[in-house]
C-alpha cells in the first residue's frame, strides 16, 4: 500500500505549492464550518470550486473540512452550503467531526464521501466501527494514540481507511477539545478561532502577594505540586524571570515513524498547518514526499529526510504519542514562540524576464545584497548570491523588506512556476 501524503491548503497559493512539492491530496477549510476560520483563503464557494477543479486537473485529491462542533444555528446553514457547493464542484471527501452534521450529510447527500475528523477523537476500534456503520469511509485517528493501538484498530477494522497526523503543531488537550482560549479571550477553539492561549507565558503568584508585576517574584527551585493521595511525589513548578510555558507542546514530527505507521495500516499521512506559510508547506511536503518515496523503494528513512524540516521554524519536535506516552520532553518550557529554523523565508518568485535575465520576487522577509540565499524548487535548492536588487520603482537598493512591493534580482535562468527564495541563518 502506498500511503497518501495529505497537506494543508490555507489558500490557493499554498495549495499549488503543496501539490508542486509532492502532496497527493490537500484539505482546505470553509471559514464558517472549519477550525481555521481566520487563516483561510477560501472565503466563498467560487474559490473552493476553483481549488477543486485545480486539484482534479492534476489528478490529485482535495478534501473539504467542516469540522466545527456546530451550534443549532449552523446546522441548516451547513446543509445549504453543501448543496450550493455541490452545484459547482465535487470534492473527493468531506472532513467532519460533529455527529449531527455527519448524519445530515448522510441524509441529504448520501453519495458524498465522509472522513471523520481528528476532532472526533477516535481512539479505539469500536469507535472506528461505529463511524463505519454510520457511513464514513475514513477515520482520522486521534493524535493521542500509539502506533501499537493503530495496529489493533486495523486488525478489527480491516476495510476502513485510516489516516494519521504525522507532522505539525499539537494541542495540549485532545485535539481542540479545550476551553483555554474560550475562557481567556472568548474565542472558542471548537468554532475555529483559537488564540493558541496554551502557548502564552503564565506566571504563578504567591498567595500573599498582591496581584501585579511589582509584587511578582519568580518561583525558583522550592515550589512543588503534590497530589493529596500521592505522598512523596512532587511535581516541580519552576519559573524563571520570564514566567513559565507549562502548557506549550512541541510540534509533532513523525517522519521516522512512517514505516511503522504504514505497516500498521495507515493509508494517509497528514500534515497540520493551514495557517503556516507557503514556504513551510513546500518544505514539509518535499520532506515527506521524499521520505514516502524512499520507504516505498525499500530504503530507510533517516537524518537526510529531516533537512527540509529543520529548514522551517518550529517549537522543537516530539513524536507525540506515536511511540507511547510522551514524557516531559514533549513540552517546551522556555519560550512560547517558535524557533526560526536553519533558513528563513525571504520571498516568492513571481516571474522571470528571460530577455533581461531578471527574477521578479515578492519579498516576504528582508532581502539584502550580499546575503546568503537559496532558490528552492520542487527538485532541489540552488545557492543564489544576491548582488543586486532593484526596487518597485526600478531603482537599485541594498535591501528590501517584506510587503506588497515587488523587487527584481538578476538570475541566469527561469526557475519555473513554483520557486521560493530563502536565507541561510
Ligand atoms: S489553546 Fe492550545 S490546546 Fe487549546 S485548542 Fe488552542 S491550540 Fe489547542
Image: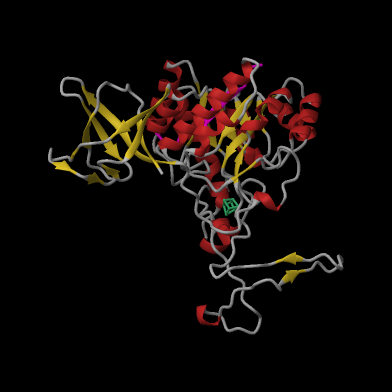
Could you tell whether 351 is left or right of 336 in the image? left
Q: Quadrant of the C terminus?
A: top left
Could you tell whether 276 is left or right of 97 in the image? left
Q: Which of the 4 image quarters holds residue 375?
A: top left
Q: Which of the 4 image quarters holds residue 88?
A: top left
Could you tell whether 417 is left or right of 328 in the image? left
State the image coordinates of residue 10 (x, y, percent, origin top left): 44, 37
State the image coordinates of residue 63 (x, y, percent, origin top left): 52, 28
Whether 391 is among the magenta residues is no
Q: Quadrant of the N terminus?
A: top right
Q: Which of the 4 image quarters holds residue 120?
A: top right
Whether 2 is among the magenta residues is yes
Could you tell whether 296 is left or right of 191 in the image? right
Q: Residue at x 13, y 38 (%)?
A: 394
Q: Residue at x 81, y 66 (%)?
A: 227
> Number of marks in the image?
0
Q: Residue at x 71, y 73 (%)?
A: 222
- Between 113 and 242, the residue placed more toward the observer is 242
Q: Residue at x 51, y 81 (%)?
A: 214
- Between 282 and 186, the residue placed more toward the observer is 282
Q: How was this image coloured?
A: secondary structure
Asked whether residue 116 appears in the rendered view, the answer is no
State the image coordinates of residue 137 (x, y, percent, origin top left): 66, 24
Q: Which residues are magenta?
A: 1-11
Asked whether residue 56 appears in the rendered view, the answer is yes
State the image coordinates of residue 312 (x, y, percent, origin top left): 47, 40
Amino acid at each position: 500500500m502506498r500511503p497518501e501524503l495529505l497537506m494543508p491548503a490555507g489558500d490557493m497559493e499554498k495549495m499549488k505549492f503543496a501539490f508542486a512539492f509532492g502532496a497527493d491530496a490537500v484539505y482546505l477549510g470553509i471559514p464558517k464550518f472549519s477550525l481555521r476560520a481566520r487563516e483561510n483563503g477560501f472565503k466563498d464557494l467560487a474559490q473552493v470550486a476553483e481549488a477543486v477543479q485545480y486539484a482534479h486537473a492534476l489528478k490529485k485529491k482535495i478534501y473539504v473540512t467542516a469540522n466545527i462542533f456546530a451550534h443549532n444555528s449552523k446546522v441548516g446553514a451547513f446543509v445549504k452550503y453543501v448543496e450550493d457547493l455541490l452545484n459547482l464542484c465535487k470534492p473527493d471527501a468531506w472532513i467532519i467531526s460533529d455527529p449531527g452534521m455527519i448524519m445530515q450529510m448522510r441524509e441529504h447527500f448520501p453519495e458524498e464521501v465522509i472522513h471523520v475528523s481528528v476532532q472526533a477523537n477516535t481512539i479505539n476500534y469500536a469507535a472506528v466501527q461505529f463511524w463505519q456503520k454510520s457511513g464514513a469511509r475514513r477515520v482520522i485517528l486521534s493524535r493521542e494514540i500509539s502506533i501499537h493501538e493503530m495496529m489493533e484498530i486495523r486488525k478489527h477494522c480491516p476495510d476502513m481507511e485510516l489516516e494519521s497526523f504525522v507532522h505539525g503543531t499539537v494541542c495540549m488537550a485532545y485535539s481542540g477539545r479545550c476551553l483555554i482560549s474560550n475562557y481567556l479571550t472568548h474565542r472558542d477553539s471548537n468554532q475555529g478561532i483559537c488564540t493558541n492561549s496554551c502557548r502564552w507565558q503564565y506566571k504563578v503568584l504567591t498567595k500573599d502577594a498582591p496581584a501585579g508585576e511589582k509584587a511578582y517574584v519568580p518561583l525558583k527551585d522550592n515550589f512543588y505540586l503534590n497530589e493529596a493521595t500521592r505522598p512523596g511525589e512532587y511535581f516541580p513548578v519552576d519559573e524563571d524571570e520570564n514566567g513559565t510555558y507549562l502548557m506549550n507542546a512541541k510540534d509533532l514530527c513523525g517522519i521516522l515513524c512512517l514505516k511503522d505507521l504504514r505497516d500498521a495500516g495507515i493509508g494517509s499521512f497528514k500534515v497540520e498547518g493551514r495557517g503556516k506559510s507557503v514556504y513551510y508547506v513546500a518544505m514539509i511536503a518535499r520532506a515527506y514526499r521524499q521520505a514516502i518515496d524512499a520507504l516505498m523503494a525499500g530504503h530507510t528513512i533517516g537524518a537526510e529526510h529531516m533537512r527540509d524540516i529543520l529548514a522551517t521554524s518550529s517549537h522543537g519536535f516530539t513524536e507525540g504519542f506515536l511511540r507511547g506516552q510522551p514524557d516531559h520532553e514533549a513540552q517546551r518550557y522556555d519560550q512560547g514562540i517558535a524557533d526560526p529554523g536553519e533558513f528563513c523565508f525571504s520571498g516568492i518568485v513571481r516571474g522571470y524576464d528571460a530577455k533581461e535575465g531578471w527574477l521578479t520576487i515578492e519579498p516576504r522577509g528582508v532581502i539584502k545584497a550580499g546575503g546568503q540565499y537559496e532558490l528552492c524548487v520542487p527538485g532541489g535548492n540552488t545557492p543564489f548570491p544576491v548582488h543586486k536588487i532593484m526596487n518597485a520603482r526600478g531603482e537599485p537598493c541594498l535591501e528590501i523588506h517584506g510587503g506588497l512591493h515587488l523587487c527584481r534580482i538578476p538570475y541566469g535562468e527561469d526557475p519555473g512556476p513554483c520557486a521560493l527564495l530563502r536565507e541561510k541563518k
